[in-house]
Image: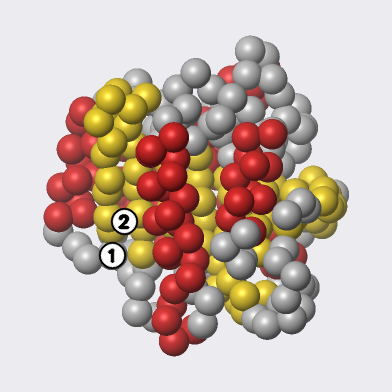
Amino acid sequence: MRGKVSKICSKAGGAFDCYLVAPETEKPVAAVVLASAIHGVDTDMIAIADELAACGVIVAAPDLFSRSIAGPLPRNDLRAAQRAQPRLEQIKAGEDDMIDTLRHLGTIPQFNGQAAVMGFCYGGPYAILGPKRLGYAAGICCHGSQMLEFLHELAGLRKQVCLMWGDEDDRAPAEVLQAYREAAARRDDVEVHVFPEVRHGYMMRTSPSFDRPAYDFSMRRACDILRCLQSPSEARNI
């Protein structure tokens, strides 16, 4: 299943690219918005989007870097790291893109109004911010980076968040993993999975860190959460 690149109009003016793929169905279905790593919507992200669409949901992968250097960048391109800084300011600005993408999903006839965020590396914080205040129904985070700064955002959150890392992730040291494990132990709507001997970037097929078992687990868990969003009654119970 392959999608296409569409233009999404920003509420603030202008437009940005978004890879969109939808199942061939007339029934109402849920959606997931992919918040990419610093390399943007590259072949790795498109492969994930296409695989998730096979679960029967609409998938959108917006370009979160249209304000600086737009489009995907090669893994060895130093501009990828540069355009993601200053990190906290860029993440804040990207909240508008996530809202605009969700608004665009509302124009798709088969969208049922329930969407999750699935964030990777740079995009990891949106797995919390999305369901906290951007209108999303759930969040999924794979090897999210700089996540300690967003731990406090779990306060007051009442929607499901699933966070996954490898225990050898150099962007999520032991204190980060421990902090989120402790948060998950205190509440029912946050789950944390840590994979042994898995490094940062395990979801990216072209990365040396790609790990098939961790990838498969993460995709299964994402599809499980998305299936629960396929009907409003089930979404209230995840």
Mark 1 → mark 2, Cα distance in angstroms: 10 Å
| Image mark count | 2
Is disc 2 surrounded by few (<14), some (14 to 19) or many (20+) residues within 10 Å? some
Q: Quadrant of residue 43?
A: top right
Residue 127: x, y in percent? Answer: 45, 52
Tell me the quarter of the image containing the C terminus.
Answer: bottom left
Residue in the image at 49% along x and 66% along y? 226
Residue in the image at 72% along x and 76% along y? 25
The residue where tag 1 is placed is 189
Question: In the rendered view, does 81 fall on the left or right side of 234?
Answer: right
- Inspect the image, locate mark 1, and give the three-letter code of the amino acid beneath it: Asp
Sequence-first disc among 1 and 2: 2
Q: How is the image coloured?
A: secondary structure
- Inspect the image, locate mark 2, and give the three-letter code of the amino acid beneath it: Leu
Q: Quadrant of residue 39?
A: top right
Q: Vertically, is 155 above or below 29?
A: above
Q: Quadrant of residue 45?
A: top right
The residue where tag 2 is placed is 154
Residue in the image at 28% along x and 25% along y? 197
Whether residue 100 can be seen here:
no
Q: What SS does tag 1 mark?
A: loop
